[in-house]
Image (tube, grey):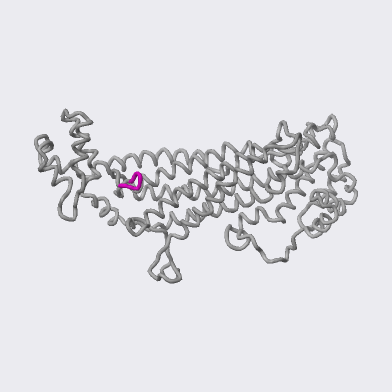
């Protein structure tokens, strides 16, 4: 076993992750959950009169925090090379009259997987609260900027106008879907088992079903109805996939912020501590989007999590141990890093710097070309086939030079097709983005009403 006094090498120990999430996966928390499951089993056995009540009480007292030490469990594991055997021996040493009954009828994964169910319940609550905070900030920005006009972009090119608020509303809708997925997944995820070596309950005899129901009820878990020696790993693979989905949505949002912060665009920027923060060790002028880049970088790692989780679904017969080692890393790292990402992103969104003047300037940068669609549609309303109208606007918007006064409006006023169908005032109205922005504003408000209704319905712990 590694020496706990060695210098930390995993960045989760000193660089990434909040104390709340690290504590959830600490060795102290793991030992507490293991002991909680052993105590619940003992109580269930006593309630079914399999073991004396005094024995169950003695085991429960020994399972309290601080009685069984991590150091003793570690020492026994060095001897036995088996973590659960070390746990049960350490617990028996402190259980007095309960010692003969510790772990009676159970197999290792009855303890490990039930404790994992407790762990994942806490993780789901933590991540659900993270999503709630991020959603609140996204909805706030969507509402605040529902009418803040900006250019929409497709393929990295100017498309048609929209509002910053609508952009935020699309992200809020996406993260709300993740919150709803989490709520739907939790009943499948937060499960345990107390059914013995290959899942049949034979070691508990005719009382097996009653003992399992009692134990799970004490733990607040559902029982996997048909486990092997382990809880079905499809449940955990689904969770790993969900982590990857949320991380990817986070990456999508952080990438949008990074792109909009580019010097050539400069419409938004993430918070920057002007008094002390350094952007570059040599280029003093830099204001790099490092927090958004951090989100994107960690998201790339989290997208790799489903791979081993899917592999872990494949077991030799009723079980092997090929899933065990990587699961000790996979879910702790996944939850801690996703918690880090969501909280980092919440801070970025909450304090995002927005430059409406720059958005207005960029909107005008192509000389009105972004309104070509509206002019084309107006031509079709005046009787021109759409394909012909499209060709008129395609030619009319080539090589505009707005810096020289060469704009879509100036060309339209001199175009023989357009000037015979529209007055100068009508053309000016058609190339004005106000109408498109009003539509974006209205849709943003409509989307926000629906999102807030759904957020209210999904409030509370996951």
Image location of residue 360, percent across then percent down = 26, 53
- Quadrant location of the N terminus in the rendered image: bottom right
Name the foreground residue: 213 vs 296.
296
Return the x and y of residue 171 as percentages of the image width and height.
43, 45
Q: Horizontally, is 429 left or right of 332 in the view?
A: left
Magenta stretch, main secondary structure class:
strand
- Is residue 418 toward the left or the right of residue 197 in the image? left
Q: Residue at x 40, y 44 (%)?
A: 169
263 or 191: nearer the eye? 263
**Residue 456 image position (x, y, % from top left):** 48, 41
Residue in the picture at 82% in, 56% down: 78
In this picture, residue 157 sits left or right of residue 248? left
Q: Residue at x 72, y 46 (%)?
A: 324
Front one among 437 and 231: 231
| Highlighted magenta segment, given as a residue range | 153-157
Regarding residue 61, the answer to whether it shows in the image is no
Q: Nearer the viewer, residue 364 or 321?
A: 321
Task: Judge whether residue 154 is colored magenta.
Answer: yes
Q: What residue is rendered at 60% in x and 49% in y?
A: 334
């Amino acid at each position: 076993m590694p020496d706990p006094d060695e210098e930390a090498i995993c960045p989760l120990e000193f660089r990434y992750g909040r104390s709340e999430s690290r504590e959830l996966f600490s060795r102290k928390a793991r030992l507490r959950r293991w002991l909680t499951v052993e105590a619940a089993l003992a109580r269930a056995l006593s309630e079914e009169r399999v073991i004396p009540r005094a024995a169950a009480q003695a085991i429960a007292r020994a399972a309290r925090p601080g009685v069984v030490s991590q150091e003793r469990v570690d020492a026994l594991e060095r001897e036995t090379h088996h973590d659960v055997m070390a746990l049960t021996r350490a617990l028996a040493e402190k259980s007095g009259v309960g010692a003969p009954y510790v772990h009676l009828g159970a197999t290792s994964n009855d303890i490990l997987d039930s404790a994992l169910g407790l762990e994942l319940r806490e993780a789901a609550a933590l991540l659900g609260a993270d999503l709630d905070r991020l959603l609140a900030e996204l909805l706030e920005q969507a509402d605040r900027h529902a009418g803040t006009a900006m250019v929409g972009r497709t393929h990295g090119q100017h498309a048609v106008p929209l509002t910053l608020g609508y952009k935020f509303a699309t992200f809020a809708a996406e993260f709300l879907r993740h919150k709803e997925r989490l709520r739907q997944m939790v009943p499948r995820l937060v499960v345990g088992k107390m059914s013995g070596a290959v899942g049949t309950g034979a070691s508990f005899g005719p009382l097996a079903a009653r003992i399992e129901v009692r134990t799970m009820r004490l733990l607040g878990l559902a029982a996997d109805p048909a486990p092997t020696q382990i809880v079905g790993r499809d449940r955990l693979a689904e969770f790993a996939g969900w982590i990857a989905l949320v991380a990817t949505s986070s990456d999508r949002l952080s990438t949008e912020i990074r792109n909009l912060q580019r010097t050539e665009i400069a419409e938004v920027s993430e918070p920057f501590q002007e008094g002390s923060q350094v952007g570059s060790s040599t280029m003093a002028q830099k204001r790099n989007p490092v927090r958004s880049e951090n989100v994107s970088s960690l998201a790339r790692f989290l997208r790799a999590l489903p791979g081993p989780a899917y592999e872990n679904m494949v077991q030799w017969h009723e079980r092997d141990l090929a899933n065990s080692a990587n699961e000790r890393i996979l879910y702790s790292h996944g939850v801690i890093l996703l918690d880090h990402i969501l909280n980092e992103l919440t801070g970025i969104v909450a304090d995002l710097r927005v430059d409406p003047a720059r958005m207005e300037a960029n909107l005008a940068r192509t000389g009105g070309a972004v309104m070509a669609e509206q002019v084309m549609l107006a031509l079709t309303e005046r009787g021109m086939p759409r394909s012909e109208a499209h060709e008129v606007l395609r030619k009319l918007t080539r090589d505009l030079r707005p810096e020289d006064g060469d704009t879509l409006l100036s060309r339209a006023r001199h175009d023989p097709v357009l000037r015979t169908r529209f007055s100068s005032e009508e053309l000016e109205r058609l190339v004005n983005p106000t109408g498109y922005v009003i539509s974006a504003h209205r849709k943003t408000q409509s989307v926000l009403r629906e999102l807030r209704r759904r957020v209210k319905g999904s409030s509370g712990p996951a």
